[in-house]
Image (cartoon, rainbow, N blue to C red):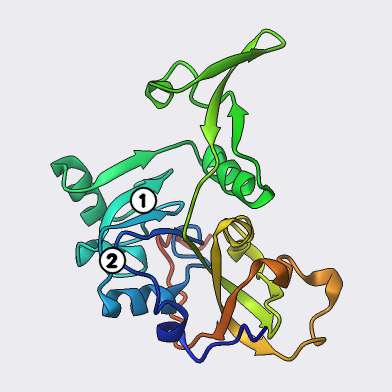
Amino acid sequence: MNKVVANAEDAIKDIESGAVLMLGGFGLCGIPENCINALVKKGSDKLTCISNNAGVDDFGIGLLLKTRQVKKMIASYVGENAEFERQLLSGELEVELIPQGTLATRCMAAGYGMPAIYTPAGVGTEVAIGKETREFNGKTYLMEYAFDADFAIVKAWKGDVHGNLIFKETARNFNPLMAMAGKVTIAEVEELVPAGELDPNQIHTPGIYVHRIFKGENYEKRIEQRTTRKPL
């Protein structure tokens, strides 16, 4: 099976309006920039996006929000995105805010083939409204369903032609979990190498989970919020 595609446009060509997408990354770290830019150009709308947050106004998922291509955001943090906040408060955008650990574990459950998880996070809060609870050893847990995403779009540091992936440092955040969880997983990488070149002991995501892979380009590597201090 040849998993290598030429570019982001080829990788996302069958993502149509109404699709449910997982997008890896944390803030602006490890986000699939090339695929997001290609989605903006393609124009698919009414998307449901599952991501840690929506980044900033003019970068990452913020670009899809700006063009009104996102119908619903499922995230754990509004972040530094003023447009996301504006659409949320105005009712233009459906938003499901969930605890970050729950977000990660619902991704993991989907990858493991588990239909649901039980978690104490959110019990007794608005998060629990309308959801099933159950007691284990005298403690109440909330049932959360595994995500059901049409596509998982991730960004890795290195990958090989079989789809094996290595993530670099902080970019190893939601990417490995989401890579396991989509019906179709698309990976963009900074460096694409032949089979056998990656050390098997260093691989974070086995290629069995990845359906399409391509070498990305022109990565900006922005910093979401820079904090400095005066020299001592």
The front one of 226 and 3 is: 3
The front one of 184 and 7 is: 184
Which residue is tagged 1?
A: 79
Q: Indicate whether 15 appears above or below 149.
A: below
Q: Quadrant of the N terminus?
A: bottom right
Amino acid at the residue labelled 2? Leu
Residue at 74% x, 91% y is 194
Percent across and percent down for residue 9 are 40, 84
In the picture, measured across the screen, residue 18 lies left or right of residue 146, that is: left
Question: Which image quadrant is residue 69 in?
Answer: bottom left
Circle count: 2
As helix, strand or loop, the secondary structure at mark 2 comes to helix
Residue at 46% x, 51% y is 52
Percent across and percent down for residue 101 are 57, 39
Which residue is tagged 2?
A: 64
Q: Residues within 10 Å of mark 1 (few under 14, many from 20)?
A: some
The front one of 98 and 20 is: 20
Amino acid at the residue labelled 1? Gly
In the picture, measured across the screen, residue 50 lies left or right of residue 18, that is: right
Q: Earlier in the sequence, mark 2 or mark 1?
A: 2
Residue at 49% x, 49% y is 148
Percent across and percent down for residue 165 are 68, 73
Residue at 45% x, 61% y is 228
